[in-house]
Amino acid sequence: MDMTAEIFAGILDAYPYEIVFVDRTHTIRWLNRAAKRRYGDRVRVGNSIFGCHNERTRPKIEAFLRRADQGEDEMFEAYNGRTGEREFFDPVRDAAGQVIGYFERHELPWTKDLADEPVGDYWTRRAEVEKR
């Protein structure tokens, strides 16, 4: 079996955590199914990441990119006290090792009583709570 773009997209769509790939110009280039489910119309391919992240985050993202250019991989970004998520900056590299973009990874808060809850169910439950 040849590994095609369609297969890679299928793998990333099966991944239950959101992936919003952003290029070096901060343009959103791709979203997996989980990201589309979580963010809906707020995040769209072709738009700037600063449509959902405000411009105050630009210096922080640029600093992460400089660190990635110097060889760092995943970097802790923030703890979101509202959601309990830890957020990480993940650079994406080409075959030559050059940083071509990035995505943000969210680590979900789990408790023993929710440890077996599927990630998609977590997002649905949390979205319902946020609507109230």
Image (cartoon, grey):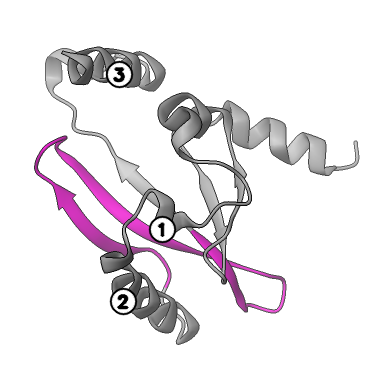
Q: Is residue 87 magenta?
A: yes
Q: Mark 3 or mark 1, which has the lower sequence index?
A: 1
Comparing 104 with 108, the one in front is 104
Residue ID at (49%, 40%): 43
Query: Residue 77: x, y in percent?
Result: 25, 61
Name which residue type carries label 1. Answer: Phe
Mark in the foreground, 3 or 1: 1
Chief secondary structure of the magenta span?
A: strand
Distance from label 2 to label 1 (Cα)? 12 Å
Magenta residues, start to end: 73-102
Q: Is residue 54 magenta?
A: no
Name which residue type carries label 3. Answer: Tyr
Distance from label 3 to label 1 (Cα)? 26 Å
Name which residue type carries label 2. Answer: Pro
Question: Vertical placement of 96 versus 31: above or below?
Answer: below
Comparing 59 with 111, the one in front is 59
Q: Which residue is mark 3?
A: 122
Mark in the foreground, 2 or 1: 1
Extreme-right residue of the structure: 1
Q: Which residue is mark 2?
A: 59
Q: Which residue is mark 1?
A: 50
Judged left or right of residue 110, residue 33 is right
Q: Mark 3 or mark 2, which has the lower sequence index?
A: 2
Q: Is residue 16 visible?
A: no
Question: Vertical placement of 3 versus 69: above or below?
Answer: above
